[in-house]
Amino acid sequence: MKNIFQKLTLVMMPLLLVGCASPLAPGSSSNNPGSSKDPVNSNSQKSSSIPQSSSSLVPHEHQWSTAWEYDNTNHWHTCSGCNEKSGSAAHTMGEFQDVDLGTLLNNPIYKFTTVNARKCSVCDYFEVNQKDSVLPEVRISYDPNDPNANFATVAKSTDTNRPSLAATVSITNCPASVAVSEKTVEKLKVRGNQTAGFPKKGLSMKFESKINLLGLNGGQRFKKWILLADAKDCTISRTALGLTMANSIIQDNSKVWASEYKPVSVYLNNQYWGMYFLAEQKESKSGRIKLPEVEDGYTGIDIGYCFELDHYAEQEPRKIDGGDPTFNISYGSYDNDSRCHDIENNLANSGSGPMTHFTMNSDITDGPVQPTDEQIAAGTKGIPVNASNSNQVKFIQNRLTALFKVLKQAAVDKKAYTINDSNTAVAANGKTVRQVVEENFDLNAWAEGFIINAIACPPDVGYSSFYMSFDNSATGDKRLRFDCPWDFDSNFGNRRNLCEGGDSGQKDPYYLDRTSNLWLQMLSKLDFFIDDYVKPLWNKVRNDKVFENCIDMLKVYYKVYANEHKKNFNKWQSIDPDDSSVLQYWSGELRDAFKRVDENSRKAAQKETINWFSKRVNYFERKWGENRPNLPTIS
């Protein structure tokens, strides 16, 4: 498994049951981040008590865990049969010293983050000196007299002509091996769609030459990097949780790509700008999205295609740099069927049923010529018909339309359709529904995407930030796949009205069978896909303790970056819905648990994030799993 936690030692290990007569089984250094008394150090693998009859003649024999459990003051061993503690003692802490957090935790997520910390000599409890800055600092400098020097404050979500400028980037407060000194950025600008409307904005950087930043992606070098703001997440952790989970679910042999990330502090002309996530740009380059690169000017259709289901596609041709090619597809008679958008009409603010608009994410090398004003005006639902200007875009438009018909016929009508040489879906005589779906869809990749989206419960997935790829090159498998999991800041219960995971009274939290993302909805109706692809992957992921590791990551994350969160919200108070500078939709978008940013509310929101995640996992364990014990919640 492509699991970024394979080397993690600070995780919750299963309790090893060792029968013993002595009050304490032989101890070993624990891999357990703590007890439930502390949301950061709570124990996610507590054993349940086994009731003992008071009249039993057989004395209870303690079975002590070999791993140390701990809270903020003590460590101990616990009996798996009765939860009695043994060997409880206070921590013996060493001296504070500067260490690499990744080395301290043996976890690559935190590598190149220097912290002033001390550790217990018996168990794995540690403390961080919150007085010091623990994040690598991305320092961006540019001419304050540049006409576009206000780029980071003036951009709005609906702007198509966002200003950009040249800059230099340095990365400090990190080991010398990954420090960066004044590397030239050709284009620095605000990124994102809706999120560009918040005061704290995401940024994109295109460097003059290829560079690696903070060891991401195995040290590979690229020109394009981004800084994600997570402005509407009062825990500033959902991107970390989403990308950690996605990278852990995606298998080693998968063709699906997911970005790596590092938490950083950003400074603009030496002014602190907040806590961000340094991440990789979504692009079809060697080492990123797994599609062949094509030279400019190549006119064949036998290339790789990556594209986004995109509510904002209509803005592309109006952008100052021309934007990316766009196209529409048809869902046929299912487009306006009320069955296909029971939920996300209300959740995603689309209001118009399934989204039919797509924006190309990979390069189109045979054009297209930008559409005229007349073409834009003639476009369906305001989307320009620029597919007519490119054979490559026209090919993927027709193929995607045909692929949906194959999937819909299989899932709803139980009929086998295939795609002929004319790029059209036709009846597949002599083939089964399963055969045609497996021939045209990479179901292993879709199983990965299905689980990622089922757990994250993204409100955007029905209308934007949903990526697919299709490799039509000579060596490509010519199957549609889910690709590039992205955009997690509204996920994991952050947005109102979303499913709670089965424990909050909803009639049915399995929203993928009613989502306006028709690709996921259709797949949910195929029993062989769920039984033979999703369930086996789910149980492998559970056996690898992916979700337990994600929870442990969050607990450490909230502990280590407590002061960084405080600094960020001292800078950006406008997440508060009562602040007059917040966009009007803000107060109606977030759930009550995630609307405030004071320290006590932030800690409660951190607990709620972990609890929501646990409930969601527990729900799907009951649906797909092997009846494993519930992941615990934090009181």
Image (spheres, helix red, strand yellow):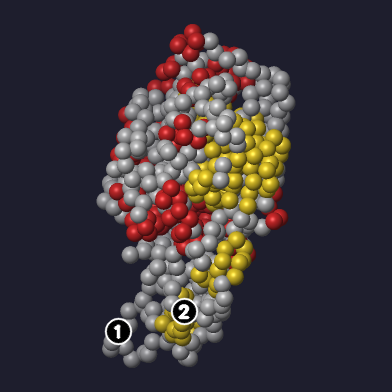
* Category of crowding for the residue at label 2, using alpha-carbon neighbours closer than 10 angstroms: few (below 14), some (14–19), many (at least 20): many
Residue nearest the viewer, comparing 413 with 472: 472
Residue nearest the viewer, comparing 587 with 417: 587
Q: Residue at x 48, y 13 (%)?
A: 376
- Percent across and percent down for residue 557 are 49, 59
Residue nearest the viewer, comparing 273 with 541: 273
Q: Residue at x 28, y 46 (%)?
A: 507
Callout 2 secondary element: strand
Q: Residue at x 30, y 48 (%)?
A: 592
Q: Amino acid at mark 2?
A: His
- Foreground mark, 1 or 2, reads 2
Of the two numbered discs 1 and 2 on the same chain, state the one appearing first in sequence. 1
- Percent across and percent down for residue 255 are 62, 42
Image position of 229 with respect to 598: above or below: above
**Mark number for residue 53?**
1
Q: For mark 2, what is the residue?
A: 75
